[in-house]
């Protein structure tokens, strides 16, 4: 039933002598049926003992098999059928990972930990993290078995890669039970947004990898041995050198692996929309200097707060197609934005529920308004950033002029099309931006006369144009500027964004 | 000279400089009478070096003959180049580092100094072509240079400079003593 063959017998014997657990035996015999690993330890032990001592089909042999403590390995030898020489029960290759941890009890433990964190999901991916030392211990029996001509023959047909990895064997053993407990399908990587991670460590043998570093890298340059570094070193080291430095079979351990707390992670969910900002005292992102909050609230916090709580996410990242200053309003259809919700415990929402969320945000404050709220994919957010560079924006500005003006004095501005301006990095952002000169286009302008020293200027400009600096000139570092055009000192008293001309995200009719 | 229009414009809200900058002063640079500088410190710590309104260059209808950013054989402020966000490559200046030398048509020569420690970001090339800018708009388009102090020194960089009130006191004292400039 477990597809062990005659020629596997000497291998099995050798491994059992070394103290290997039964699942590791199956692995080295390249047993690839996942169901085999789900069988209970006793079943497997009994089966292997039977397979390997055909003489002991008599009553005493069988009794011995079934009476023996579950973890004790029998010395399978035609000459003497005594209890194993092993004092410790722990498999020297998998350090216990494929022993007790494959029992239903552990799977239940894992499932309980997941349930406690209250995620909603239909499926999950199981990831397992093993101590780096296991890679080393894995090589050891393989190395010794290679000296075994029968193993050599087998491995030449199938290739060493056909030995089943500890990780896979473990997953095969537990995923059924875990899936059952959680009522979800356990699927392969990237097929599910929800990841359950089980990690094992083994402090007792952490020094095992030392020799690799000395032998291969000729130094111990780090105190933490990453799995990658160990794998690389194992690829480099010759078998001869390996067997010189590392015992075959591996030294027995006194403790088994410890399982760290089960962790869960859900991939990010992206919510997009467009926002209006009606306040002139609201920054887009929190304004904090030296740990002190300079102004209460921010656009991103107002939008993200209800989302964080409905999706039960751990955190968020807010991004948008451009930004506006604290004292600038965003009118019209608003500015596109996207919120990445990190590790959401709930990710499935229908249209009505999202609509409701939009309402909640809009009710929470009169300083902002959100529209077209929808769940989007991660890729979709790059469309938003496109707009930052390429699209046009329209603005409305309240202008003050030093010289007295009359309505006809403004007419010429409407006739200026695609005005080329050169803007050095404005002084007000120069502390955090590189010094450069930006060529920009002011596509068109219209005016509304207000009084001798005031008028409203509406402009349509290329993305990335600094409007305030175009008006007052920024010490002459934006040329030409409105002061030059109107031949007077001018200043900007108020600015509104009238439109951000991108057609993303798609409009959601009310 | 105050007319109706001027009165109107004075009612306006604070100017760009008023909104974003603090005015600091250094007077009688290197002991030279009345050679006063005005340092405009932005709330983001960037400083713009300008002539104070009491500087001799701006008095008595003087005209500028020449502005020279080559302050020594090996050093021209025009060659200053910064790159990246951290403005690498900018010439580091101390308080008495010369920025430029200005010669007026009456052959009087004046050196303009940094007044603060920091990295030179740019000097005003517009005044090379149009020196009148310096005379007409010394506080805005006629600025001399832009300097970025070290982050750790953002606040301390103005220690040793005068506030607007202190500067006005100095001016008052001068008027009383009738010092010619």
Image (tube, coloured by chain):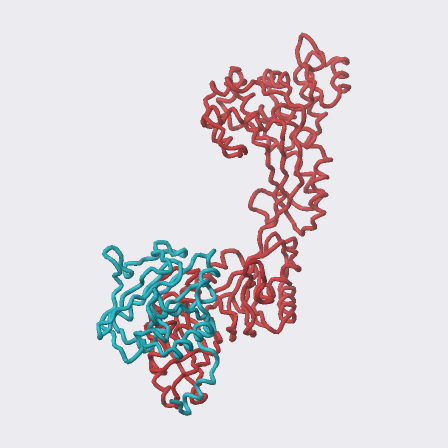
In the rendered image of this protein, does residue B79 appear above or below residue A257? below
Residue A161 percent location from the top left of the image: 51, 28
Look at the image and tell me whether residue A394 can be seen: no
User: Between A165 and A58, which is closer to the camera in this rendering?
Assistant: A165
Residue A114 percent location from the top left of the image: 69, 45
B133 left or right of A506 in image: left
Quadrant in the rendering for residue B161: bottom left
Residue B46 percent location from the top left of the image: 42, 64
A71 left or right of A323 in image: right
Quadrant in the rendering for residue A55: top right
Residue at the spot 45% in from the left edge and 83% down from the top edge: A456
The image quadrant where one finds the C terminus of chain A is bottom right
In the rendered image of this protein, does residue A278 appear above or below residue A226? below
Q: How many marks?
A: 0
State which chain is coloured red: A
In the rendered image of this protein, does residue A34 appear above or below residue A191? above
- In the rendered image, the residue lying farthest to the front is B177
Residue A416 percent location from the top left of the image: 33, 80
Residue at the spot 62% in from the left edge and 18% down from the top edge: A18
Look at the image and tell me whether residue A238 can be seen: yes
In the rendered image of this protein, does residue B113 appear above or below residue A31? below
- In the rendered image, the residue lying farthest to the top is A79
The image quadrant where one finds the N terminus of chain A is top right
Chain B colour in the picture: cyan
């Amino acid at each position: 039933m477990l597809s062990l063959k005659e020629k596997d017998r000497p291998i099995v014997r050798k491994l059992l002598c070394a103290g290997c657990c039964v699942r590791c035996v199956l692995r080295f015999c390249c047993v690839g049926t996942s169901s085999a690993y789900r069988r209970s330890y006793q079943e497997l032990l009994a089966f292997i003992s039977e397979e390997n001592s055909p003489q002991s089909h008599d009553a005493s042999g069988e009794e011995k098999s079934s009476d023996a403590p579950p973890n004790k390995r029998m010395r399978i030898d035609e000459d003497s059928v005594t209890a194993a020489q092993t004092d410790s029960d722990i498999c020297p290759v998998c350090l216990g990972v494929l022993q007790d941890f494959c029992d239903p009890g552990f799977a239940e433990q894992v499932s309980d930990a997941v349930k406690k964190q209250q995620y909603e999901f239909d499926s999950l991916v199981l990831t397992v993290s093993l101590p780096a030392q296991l890679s080393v211990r894995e090589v050891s029996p393989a190395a010794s078995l290679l000296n075994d001509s029968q193993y050599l023959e087998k491995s030449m047909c199938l290739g060493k890669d056909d030995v089943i990895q500890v990780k896979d064997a473990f997953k095969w053993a537990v995923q059924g039970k875990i899936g059952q407990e959680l009522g979800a399908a356990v699927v392969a990587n990237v097929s599910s947004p929800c990841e359950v991670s089980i990690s094992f460590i083994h402090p007792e043998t952490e020094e095992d990898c030392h020799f690799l570093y000395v032998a291969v890298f000729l130094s111990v340059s780090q105190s933490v041995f990453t799995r990658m570094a160990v794998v690389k070193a194992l690829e480099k080291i010759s078998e001869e050198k390996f067997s010189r430095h590392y015992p075959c079979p591996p030294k027995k351990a006194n403790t088994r692996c410890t399982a760290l707390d089960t962790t869960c992670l859900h991939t990010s969910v992206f919510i997009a929309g467009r926002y209006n900002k009606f306040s002139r005292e609201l920054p887009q992102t929190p304004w904090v200097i030296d740990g002190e909050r300079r102004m209460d609230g921010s656009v991103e916090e107002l939008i993200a707060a209800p989302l964080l709580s409905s999706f039960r996410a751990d955190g968020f990242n807010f991004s948008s197609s451009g930004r506006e200053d604290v004292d600038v309003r965003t009118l019209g259809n608003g500015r596109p934005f996207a919120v990445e919700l990190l590790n959401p415990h709930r990710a499935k929402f229908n249209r009505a529920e999202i609509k409701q969320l939009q309402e909640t945000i809009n009710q929470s404050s009169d300083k902002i308004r959100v529209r077209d709220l929808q769940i989007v994919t991660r890729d979709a957010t790059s469309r938003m950033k496109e707009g930052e560079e390429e699209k046009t924006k329209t603005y409305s500005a309240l202008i003050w002029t030093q010289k007295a003006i009359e309505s006809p004095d403004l007419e010429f501005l409407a006739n200026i099309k695609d005005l080329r301006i050169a803007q050095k990095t404005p002084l007000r952002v120069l502390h955090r931006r590189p010094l450069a000169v930006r060529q920009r286009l002011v596509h068109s302008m219209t005016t509304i006369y207000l009084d001798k020293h005031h008028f409203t200027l509406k402009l349509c400009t290329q993305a990335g144009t600094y409007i305030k600096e175009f008006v007052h000139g920024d010490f002459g570092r934006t040329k030409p500027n409105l002061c030059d055009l109107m031949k007077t000192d001018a200043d900007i008293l108020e600015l509104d964004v009238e439109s951000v001309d991108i057609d993303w995200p798609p409009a959601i009719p009310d | 000279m105050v007319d109706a229009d001027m009165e109107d414009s004075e009612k306006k809200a604070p100017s760009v400089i008023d909104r974003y900058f603090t005015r600091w002063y250094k007077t009688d640079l290197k002991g030279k009478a009345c050679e006063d500088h005005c340092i405009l410190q932005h709330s983001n710590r960037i400083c713009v070096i300008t002539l104070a309104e009491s500087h001799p260059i701006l008095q008595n209808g003087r005209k500028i003959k020449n502005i020279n950013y080559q302050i020594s054989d090996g050093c021209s402020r025009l060659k200053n180049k910064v790159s990246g966000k951290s403005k690498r490559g900018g010439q580091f200046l101390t308080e008495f580092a010369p920025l430029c030398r200005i010669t007026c048509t009456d052959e009087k020569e004046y050196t303009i100094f940094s007044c603060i420690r920091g990295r030179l970001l740019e000097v005003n090339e517009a005044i090379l072509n149009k020196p009148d800018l310096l005379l007409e708009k010394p506080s805005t388009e006629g600025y001399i240079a832009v300097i970025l102090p070290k982050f750790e020194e953002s606040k301390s960089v103005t220690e040793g400079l005068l506030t607007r009130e202190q500067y006005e006191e100095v001016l008052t004292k001068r008027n009383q003593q009738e010092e010619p400039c």
